[in-house]
Amino acid sequence: MATRNTKIGRHIGLNLRRARRAAGLSQEDLGFRAGLHRTAVSQLERGERVPRADSVIRLAGVLGIPPGELLAGVVWEPIAFTVGRYGMARCAEAETGGTNGGEADA
């Protein structure tokens, strides 16, 4: 089962790849201009990494788009907790993958 960060990373990666291709840049060109290695751009596009805030800002700047476009469609919901006799615990729904991590269905 994919983690929430993985799902978020994949969504950001699709937005990044779409914007990079629309700008007519290679991964190497984008990485060089944004101060990232080509392999880092590749990992971001495949959703293997979730970018830091400063990376989102730099990538968006190179692509000439608002940073929010790279985050478009990404929604995160906090994990539901219950308070029981022994303290807080995750709800069973969150444990079994009953939620989609806030990600909109494609």
Image: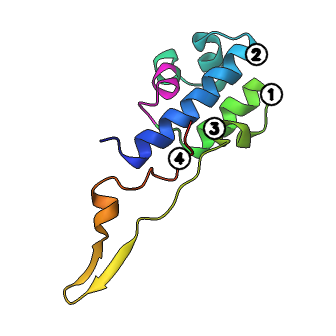
Name the quadrant containing residue 64.
Answer: top right
Task: Tell which circle, 3 or 4, labels the residue nearer the N-terminal end.
Answer: 3
Q: Nearer the viewer, mark 1 or mark 4?
A: 4
> What is the quadrant of the N terminus in the image?
top left
Q: Amino acid at mark 3?
A: Val
The residue closer to the viewer here, 4 or 67, is: 4
Q: Residue at x 46, y 31 (%)?
A: 47
**Which residues are the magenta region?**
42-49
What is the distance, in whole Å, between disc 3 and disc 2 at their CAs? 16 Å
Secondary structure beneath label 4: loop
> What is the quadrant of the C terminus in the image?
top right
Q: Residue at x 64, y 42 (%)?
A: 71
Q: Residue at x 55, y 24 (%)?
A: 36
The residue closer to the viewer here, 78 or 42, is: 78
Q: Is residue 55 above or below residue 75?
A: above
Task: Tell which circle, 1 or 4, labels the residue nearer the N-terminal end.
Answer: 1
Q: Determine which of the numbered discs, if any, sits on residue 84 in the image.
A: none
Task: Check residue 48 for magenta coloring.
Answer: yes
What is the distance, in whole Å, between disc 3 and disc 1 at their CAs? 12 Å
Q: Which residue is mark 4?
A: 103
Relative to residue 34, is residue 62 drawn left or right? right
Q: Nearer the viewer, mark 2 or mark 4?
A: 4
Name the quadrant containing residue 90.
Answer: bottom left
Q: Determine which of the numbered discs, if any, sits on residue 64 in the image.
A: 1
Q: Determine which of the numbered discs, if any, sits on residue 56 in the image.
A: 3
